[in-house]
Amino acid sequence: MENNQNIKWHKQSVTKLDRQKANNHKSFVIWFTGLSGSGKSTIANVLEVELFKQGVQTFCLDGDNIRHGLNENLGFTDQDRKENIRRIAEVAKLFVNAGVVVLVSVISPFSEDRNEARKLLGNDEFFEVYVKCPLEVCEKRDPKGLYKKAKAGHIKQFTGISQRYEQPTNPELTLDTSKLSVNESVTTLLSYLKKHLERN
Ligand SMILES: Nc1ncnc2c1ncn2[C@@H]1O[C@H](COP(=O)(O)OS(=O)(=O)O)[C@@H](OP(=O)(O)O)[C@H]1O
Ligand SMILES: Nc1ncnc2c1ncn2[C@@H]1O[C@H](COP(=O)(O)OP(=O)(O)O)[C@@H](O)[C@H]1O
């Protein structure tokens, strides 16, 4: 793009490593993907409380919340979901550069978009967590009444009902929330993250 030719990257004196050193832990993204109602936000929220208690600098980027502001102009077509994920990945990267552990909870139904996010962050700073839950269980939970509306035809392109969800093939972690309690999922995550938080 013509504009990009006139834009120069400014190197900043305080680096990501400086910030990680000050925080005494590494920074990275934990990317929760799964169907609506699978438990992404619930688990991310409890995990954040536990990390916060340990003195870890954290921030949650939740799809629903970000669609109230930064992404309020996006809907649920394939193209809009792609742009939603692209922006969230870019924001997550800024937080990682700021030394923060970022908990992203977004359906992110398409493998290609999740892989783009992974590429942007790099394998050392992107941990994909598949919050697995059978559609029937999500429908039964239906915490926001959205499945009921979608099945009645009132919401178009609803993930799992009228739009596809592509399961992750190689996630760092899979949490089956039809089998694990919220606390069990959080304990699994905390033990996985322990070594990743440590600075060399
Ligand atoms: N058509 C359709 N499909 C799926 N979800 C829908 C839809 N319309 C609204 N909602 C609500 O929006 C939340 C999903 O937003 P995301 O940003 O996570 O979606 S995506 O990653 O771009 O696919 C999702 O939040 P969660 O239930 O927390 O997953 C829903 O509350
Ligand atoms: N084992 C479990 N793990 C996570 N959530 C559970 C579990 N059992 C029941 N739930 C409930 O399922 C719902 C999941 O909703 P939410 O966290 O908003 O999902 P998502 O963010 O994936 O849409 C919540 O009401 C939560 O209390």
Image (tube, rainbow, N blue to C red):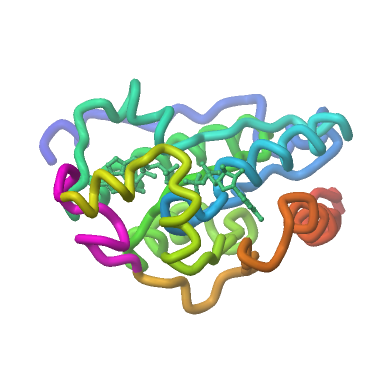
Residue 185: image location, x then y, percent: 73, 57
Would residue 95 be found to the left or right of residue 80 on screen? right
Q: Is residue 57 above or below residue 39?
A: above
The correct choice, above or below, for 174 with respect to 156 in the image is below
Percent x, y for residue 33? Answer: 48, 56
- The residue lying toward the viewer, choosing from 79 and 136, is 136
Q: Is residue 83 magenta?
A: no
Q: Quadrant of the C terminus?
A: bottom right
Please name the residue shown 48% across and 78% down the image.
169
Asked whether residue 196 appears in the rendered view, the answer is no
Q: Quadrant of residue 52?
A: top right
Total marks placed: 0
**Based on the displayed image, in which of its 4 quarters is residue 20 positioned?**
top right
Is 154 contained in the magenta span? yes
Residue 69 place in picture, x, y as percent? 34, 21
Picture quarter with ligand 1: top left
The stretch in magenta equals: 153-165
Q: Residue furthest top?
A: 69
Of residues 99 and 57, which is closer to you in this image?
Answer: 57
Give the residue displayed 36% in from the left and 67% down from the top. 111
Residue 133, position as x, y percentages in the image: 53, 65
Residue 4 vs residue 191: left or right? left
- Front-most of 22 and 47? 47
Name the residue rendered at 56%, 41% in the picture. Answer: 41
- Residue 127's quadrant in the figure? bottom right
For the stretch drawn in magenta, the main secondary structure is loop
Residue at 31% in and 62% down: 160
Q: Residue lying furthest bottom in this view?
A: 169
Position of 38 with respect to 42 (left or right) is left
Q: Is residue 27 visible?
A: yes
Which image quarter is the N terminus in?
top left
